[in-house]
Amino acid sequence: MLKLVHSVGFILRWATGLSFAVLMVAVLVQVFMRTFSSGGSPVWTEEVTRYALLYVAGFGAGASLWTGAMVNVDLLSEHLPGHWPWRLRLLSALAVLFFAVILIEPAWRFTKIGMMQTSPSMPFVKMAYIHASVLVLLIMLAIAAGIRVVGMLTGTLDGHPEMRVEEDVP
């Protein structure tokens, strides 16, 4: 189970980083062309930037849930007595899992609609690849929450994120 946990965390971080790298390259091309070219920047750079940002959000949502960077209000819950903090972490993970799973099917339909459309400035790119960012977001959240629920119920995880933000601050 721990190997799966670390593998999923690695994939989420890697995919988020790759999406962010694509975003940075597109923005750099746009800035460079606006600065040093009389013809302005290519039209496609704006679209690639938007699409990469969607994938940063898609993969980053799962990664942030995984690492504890997702906004979390645990000021009260973590100070409750007994097993209440654990129960609330489990309830939170179950709620995320439930809503993510419920929304996967509509996101799949949304993605399929994109097969009939192409990108405005890049006609060789089907919008399904762009619409899939919503599907990726929901699947990543479902995987992260599902592993957390299973880990908590089997006792291999306590429901705390892989990396607590407070532990990084000296």
Image (cartoon, rainbow, N blue to C red):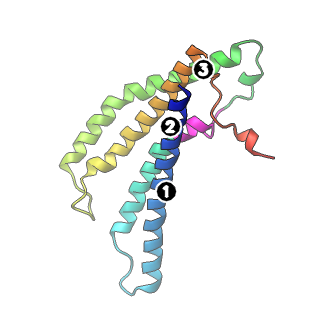
Give the mark nearer the N terminus: 1 vs 2.
2
SS at mark 2?
A: helix
Q: Position of residue 11 (x, y in %)?
A: 48, 42
Most extreme residue toward the bottom, as rendered?
Answer: 38
Q: CA distance from mark 1 to mark 2?
A: 20 Å
Marks 1 & 2, CB-CB < 8 Å contact: no
Residue 75 within the magenta-colored segment of the rendering: no
Compare residues 107 and 129 and report the one nearer the observer.
129
Please tell me whether residue 126 is drawn above or below residue 108 in the rendered image.
below
SS at mark 1?
A: helix
The region drawn magenta spans 63-72
Left or right: residue 151 compared with residue 166: left
Most extreme residue toward the left, as rendered?
Answer: 116
Q: Position of residue 167 (x, y in %)?
A: 75, 40
Q: CA distance from mark 2 to mark 3?
A: 16 Å
Which of label 1 and label 2 is nearer to you?
2
> How many marks on residues?
3
Q: Which mark is residue 7?
A: 2
